[in-house]
Amino acid sequence: MPQVKRDYSVLVVSGKEQSAKLLSAMLLSFGYRQTETVSSVGEAKRRLLRCRYDIIIIDSPLPDESGSDFAVDTAYSTRAGVMLTVKSEYYERACRKVEDFGVMAVPKPIEKRDFYTAVKLMTSTAARLLNDEKRILKLQEKLEEIKLVNRAKFILIEKHKMTESEAHRFIEKDAMDSRRSKAQVAKEIIDKE
């Protein structure tokens, strides 16, 4: 099977040591080298406080909590792709409970090829979420810059009797002349007042 292009971090939550080993071995054979395993929801929650994962695989049933509840909570609170494995007789019920929250349910027993397909879907989800996160951060930075520039323009209009276009031009020119961003120039204007 083809190798993964980048190292995705994977957390496997399984109450059964044999299942955890099997899932980890399959992940390793797919090229996922950053795989960690924990045996309970409590342990997984502590791990999630310290680390970020791209993919989280929850092998239910778990000894201390419902796997489906934990899967939904994890999908809501992290950017990771979340997979819940359930016994085939509970598969339809699990799907109804988790799929609207972005959790992929997979019936057990899991064939290697099906597991590979599901993990690749999780990988593409993780990559998409990471790209979305980067875009959101850039937009937030741009929004902050716009807010700063508008506050600085308001100061220039109020205190220095400039028009809106004169204030805008003043900030742009100062930024170009001093080789700084408009946000840096705007912050300087705000700090002086």
Image: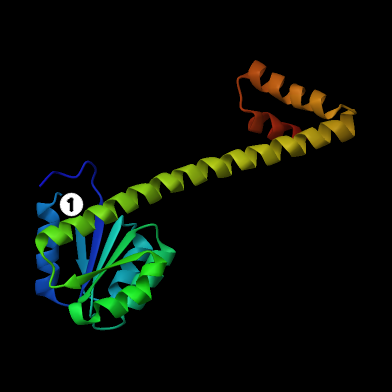
Q: Residue 90: percent from the left, percent from the top? A: 24, 81
Helix, strand or loop for disc 1: loop
Judge left or right: residue 179 versus residue 81: right
Dot 1, how many residues are within 10 Å of its Cα: few (below 14), some (14-19), or many (20+)?
A: many
Which residue is at 19% across, 78% downward? 87
Q: Residue 134: percent from the left, percent from the top? A: 45, 43
Q: Residue 14: percent from the left, percent from the top? A: 20, 73
Which residue is at 65% across, 33% downward? 183
Q: Where the C terminus falls, by quadrant?
A: top right
Residue at the disc numbered 1: 32
Which residue is at 82% across, 29% downward? 164
Q: Residue furthest front?
A: 92
Height in image: 183 above or below 51?
A: above
Q: Amino acid at mark 1?
A: Tyr
Q: Nearer the viewer, residue 39 or 103?
A: 103
Q: Nearer the viewer, residue 131 or 182?
A: 131
Height in image: 55 above or below 17?
A: above
Q: Residue furthest right?
A: 161
Which residue is at 64% across, 37% downward? 145
